[in-house]
Amino acid sequence: MRLIQLAILLLTITLLPACKSAQVYSDHDPSAKFDSYSNFMVLEHMRSIPIKEDTKLWLHSAIKEQMQNRGYSESKSPDLLVKIMIKSKTKETTSLQRNDKFYWGSTYYPYGWGLNTGVDRVEYNTHTEGTIIIDVIDREKKELIWQASASGAAKNDKKLTEEAVKKLIEKIFVTYPLAPKQ
């Protein structure tokens, strides 16, 4: 019975991080006419943490695909500038593992049931969590018209793949005010 409980606990602990996904936040200028723009250009990363060249290509490709799905074309003299920034933050977590077990007899309760409520172990963990920020700027007016960020997008123990980057960018662009063209 105890082995089954332990197996269920380990399975739950293993699957919980997989359920957590990036949290997306966005905001846009309500006066901007997103359908009046026709082209865009993706800028290089600015004031960002260094990332691998592959990841940079995946990000640019996924953003280009999302912008083109919305009817924009890529151009050297664009209406819209798309800026990507990636920031990281080190987070610390503390976990206590308690020993709350009933037992029969001890030094404190020699003739009956007792309860041990001591803390067995304290664990301190640190991990780096990434946030991706995408800004869409009206080039002519030099104004930000849409911004979205996904926090918890990348963690130091998680390998990024092209598919994961593509899904993340799709999730971010769901909040873009102009829907994809069919």
Image (cartoon, rainbow, N blue to C red):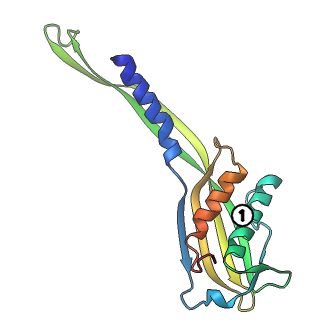
Farthest-out residue, right: 76
Q: Position of residue 7 (x, y in %)?
A: 43, 24
Q: How packed is label 1: few (under 14 Cα within 10 Å), some, or many (20 or more)?
A: many
Q: Position of residue 146 (x, y in %)?
A: 61, 79
Q: Is residue 168 above or below residue 138?
A: above
Q: Residue at x 39, y 17 (%)?
A: 3
Q: Position of residue 108 (x, y in %)?
A: 20, 13
Q: Is residue 21 above or below residue 175?
A: above
Q: Is residue 18 left or right of residue 96?
A: right
Quickly name the residue at label 1. Answer: 62
Q: Nearer the viewer, residue 89 or 82?
A: 82
Q: Nearer the viewer, residue 111 or 59?
A: 59
Farthest-out residue, front: 182
Q: Quadrant of the N terminus?
A: top left
What amino acid does circle 1 point to?
Answer: Ala
Q: Residue at x 64, y 63 (%)?
A: 169
Q: Nearer the viewer, residue 70 or 59?
A: 70
Q: How many numbered badges does the structure rendering display?
A: 1
Q: Position of residue 60 (x, y in %)?
A: 76, 65
Q: Is residue 73 left or right of residue 12?
A: right
Q: In terms of image quadrants, where is residue 26?
A: bottom right
Q: Is residue 20 above or below residue 72?
A: above
Q: Quadrant of the C terminus?
A: bottom right
What is the secondary structure assignment of the residue under circle 1? helix
Q: In terms of image quadrants, where is residue 78?
A: bottom right
